[in-house]
Image (cartoon, helix red, strand yellow):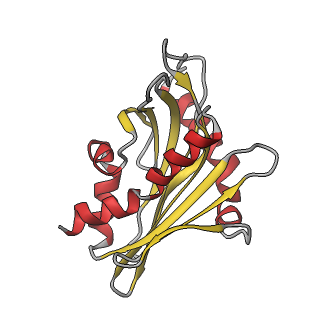
Amino acid sequence: MDDVNEREKAIEAVNKRKPELEEWLNRPIWKDYDKDESVGYKAWYCDEEGTGFRSIKSKIIINKSMKEIFDYVADLNNKPKYDHSLDHCKEILKCDDNYFIQYYNYKGAFLISNRDFYIVSYQKYDDNFSEMFCTNFSDPKYPEVKGVVRAELIYAGFQFKKVDGGVEVTYYTEGDMKLNQMLVNTTLSEVAKQVVYLKKLLEN
């Protein structure tokens, strides 16, 4: 597959799922999950009907400029600093200024193999509202890695909204990490706190 066709397939993957995002984020079924009032952090969860997937979203305000926050999150070298479950990640292909194909590999645990997936990352910057939307990217060009379980990502990403006091950062994810429910719950507790770790990194 040449780069032009790969770009078209990446755009198609985003267009298939992104139109559903706002409705998904604003559903009334989200339940309180975690909070830390000392840093203004709050998180919610919901169990997806029909799939058993558990989704998570979390919010915090970071007292930095939109540009600083967006550029920091866009740089994959910074990802393991706030996503502590991540083993490694890399860019596979920059389709254009907005679409990127990326690879993520997440740490396993005792008797649990690493999980990985290929994604399309759609990134759009604006001084008042910016976003990074990711979804699964599947192609025979990217076969499964021996000893690693191929997971599935439905949605994941960040939204950045300019507010009084800085930028409101929202993180969200829904996916199938091919784990039992107990391990999923433990993993998502850490995943939700990415915004807290991000705040500490950028403000300190």
Above/below status of 121 relative to 3:
below
Residue 133 appears in view: no
Asked whether, in this view, residue 57 is left or right of residue 201, the answer is right
Above/below status of 127 relative to 192:
below
Q: Camera-side residue: 100 or 178?
A: 178
Q: Which quarter of the figure is the N terminus placed in?
A: top right
Please tell me which residue is depicted at 55% across the width and 39% down the height of the picture: 183
Above/below status of 154 relative to 63:
above
Please tell me which residue is depicted at 44% across the width and 35% down the height of the picture: 102
Question: How many labels sit on residues?
Answer: 0
Residue 3 on image: x %, y %: 48, 28
Residue 188 on image: x %, y %: 52, 50
Q: Camera-side residue: 187 or 127?
A: 187
Residue 150 appears in view: yes
The residue at the far bottom in this view is: 164
Q: Which quarter of the figure is the C terminus placed in?
A: bottom left
Asked whether, in this view, residue 80 is left or right of residue 177, the answer is left
Please tell me which residue is depicted at 52% across the width and 31% down the height of the picture: 117
Residue 27 on image: x %, y %: 72, 68
Asked whether, in this view, residue 123 is left or right of residue 174, the answer is left
Q: Camera-side residue: 178 or 99?
A: 178
